[in-house]
Image (cartoon, grey):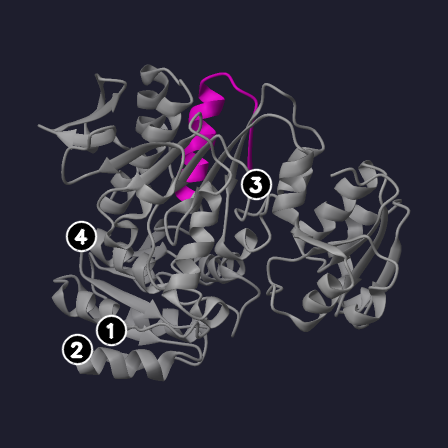
Amino acid sequence: MNYEKKKVLVVGMARSGVAAAQLLRAYGAEVTVNDAKSEAELGAQLKPLEGLQLERRFGCRTEDLLEGKDCMVISPGVPIQAPFVTKAREMGIYVTGELELASQLSLGTLVAVTGTNGKTTTVSLLGEIFSNSGKVTHVVGNIGYPFSLAAMVSKKDDVIVSEVSSFQMETADTFHPHVALLTNITEDHLNRHGTMEVYTAMKMRVFGNQTPEDYAVFNADDPGLAGLSRQVSSHVLKFSRKREVREGAFVRDGQILIRMDGTEKKVCRPDEIYIPGPHNLENALGAICVAAAMKVPIPVIRHTLKTFRGVEHRIEKVRTLDGITYINDSKGTNVDSTIKAVQTMMEPTVIILGGFDKHTSFDPLSREIVQSPMIRKAILIGETAELIRASLKRAGFESIDDAGSLGEAVEKARNSADDGWNVLLSPACASFDMFKDYEERGRIFKEIVGELKSRK
């Protein structure tokens, strides 16, 4: 779409909205920016817009700004069922999101990663792989660096690796990655999507515009993906840590192999991957498929798997004090993600759970905690504390305590732990009841842990 001289309303001034406004001005659009918060409340978030010619309409209703607009770009936090979105479409206004906008205006080869868990680690790993192969690489999307910023500087030979959420896919009509990866699907965001069928359909939209010249990568071990690969038009690759696959990445006789076009190549041993845990083996296998589809040499993939150190807030060791290791897994924002963190624990562990209610069941996590020989106690915080408590008790887990704040939770966990134990923050919930996002929650956890004094 040509946005020059188009009257565009950008709704929501978080990072992606601000970046969308910058991109649209660069392409000659007449931009109005809008947020329910006042300019004073938004504060430093608006700094990138300084010097740009645009209309600022803050602290007012979006419905009142639709007249005369050609296009509206909405934040991922805005559901497509929102009344002002419905009204805009009825008025003939083109409604899109920042991800779709940026994909229309960017250059380079697009790679997309979606799924319930593993997205951030996988896109970060892929970013390292492509950079190590000599490509100018932009890691963008739901990971925190808006696609729109990359779209302003990307070149034809660049690689763009985009982390894609189900929220963003609601408005992704022409989004067309050359390679797209679906890591897994488990219950999440039902407060937004309503049913697993709708949530799954949003994830599958990432493949919707692909052709037989493109690649679709699926996790063969995830029951939530069973049969979904038959719905795509692109070349399918699969990965599995449990069995061989016809085309894709798998483990056999202690070696990771990639099989494509009838040829098998050894990559490395699973124990040579720097980041630990079965979930990270899955992330690595998916990344191998994507990299192989993009013709990255095997030695580059091997080197990156051996040296990539993971991402902040995902099973991140913060410090060891008085024999207790503190682990930040604030990115554990749903049940399945926290289950994977629990499975990674190799020492006795006190886990801190709880946060914003996304209307999902905690029972699978409770069963995992009961079955784990390592989880010795749970400290509960946030609005889901009572829901988690009830679920844990139904499963037969009784070693539970409550805390009114994250600081109190850390202190109680420390008092419950012994020498050689872990204290694990992996909430299994979003953060919005107590924090701006999981990153703020993780940073504050690390600050609290960093300020602890030795008792010895």
Does the image show residue 397?
Answer: no
Q: Look at discs 1 and 3 and give the one toward the viewer.
A: 3
Q: Amino acid at mark 1?
A: Asp
CA distance for labels 2 and 1: 7 Å
Instruction: Say which residue label 1 marks.
Output: 363
Q: Earlier in the sequence, mark 1 or mark 3?
A: 3
In front: mark 4 or mark 1?
1
Residue stretch rendered in magenta on the structure: 121-139
Provide the secondary structure element on which disc 4 rests: loop
Q: Is residue 364 left or right of residue 380?
A: left
**Cα separation between marks 4 and 3:** 41 Å
Considering the numbered disc 3 on the image, is that residue within a helix, a strand or a loop?
Answer: loop
Q: Amino acid at mark 4?
A: Met
Of the numbered discs 2 and 4, the one sitting upstream in the chain is: 4
Proximity of marks 4 and 3: CB atoms separated by less than 8 Å? no
Q: If you read the primary sequence from the N terminus, does the residue marked by circle 2 or circle 3 appear first?
A: 3
| Residue picked out by circle 4 | 346
Front residue (pair 413, 355): 355
Q: Are marks 2 and 1 in contact (CB under 8 Å)?
A: yes
Q: Is 135 one of the magenta-colored residues?
A: yes
Based on the displayed image, in which of its 4 quarters is residue 328 positioned? bottom left
- Identify the residue at image location x=42%, y=22%: 294
Which residue does the numbered mark 2 point to in the structure image?
Answer: 395
